[in-house]
Image: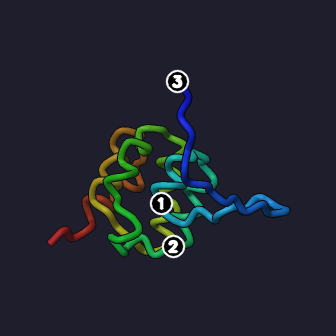
Amino acid sequence: MLARAQETKEFVVVPKKTIYKKESFADILHEGKKEKILQFIEEKNILNKDIFKFTDIYWLLKDKGYYFGIINILKKRGIFEFVVWSYSFMHNDVQTIIEFFQHDRG
């Protein structure tokens, strides 16, 4: 038995593939490129919870390279985040451990 579609669809042919700029952190994180992840953290308003959540990067902080990249960006931007700083113990980052204890969490 053969079925035949009643509806026809129209396709639009374009000369170039449209590339959408990845703006959300979820897209960039999914892509997994270290330099793009660090660039987002360095350039975007990461204090805006609608575009960035620190909980999304905690697993990255187990990696020493990511940890130092992220912690250096946050220090440069003057942003303290308790859990991020706590990874200083895992990486034996003495200076950041000192800052961790000096920071007022209240």
* Residue extending furthest toward the front: 1
Q: Position of residue 61 (x, y in %)?
A: 42, 45
Q: Position of residue 60 (x, y in %)?
A: 44, 43
Q: Is residue 104 left or right of residue 29?
A: left
Q: Position of residue 40 (x, y in %)?
A: 55, 64
The answer to whether 102 is drawn above or below residue 60 in the figure is: below
**Residue drawn at the location 43% of the way across and 74% of the way down:** 78
Q: Secondary structure at mark 3?
A: loop
Marks 1 and 3: in contact by CB < 8 Å? no
In this figure, which residue is indicated by the disc labeled 3? 1
Q: Is residue 10 left or right of residue 71?
A: right
In this figure, which residue is indicated by the disc labeled 1? 25
The front one of 74 and 9 is 9
In this figure, which residue is indicated by the disc labeled 2? 44
Cα separation between marks 3 and 2: 58 Å
Q: Secondary structure at mark 2?
A: loop
**Residue drawn at the location 61% of the way across and 47% of the way down:** 33
Q: Position of residue 77 (x, y in %)?
A: 48, 74
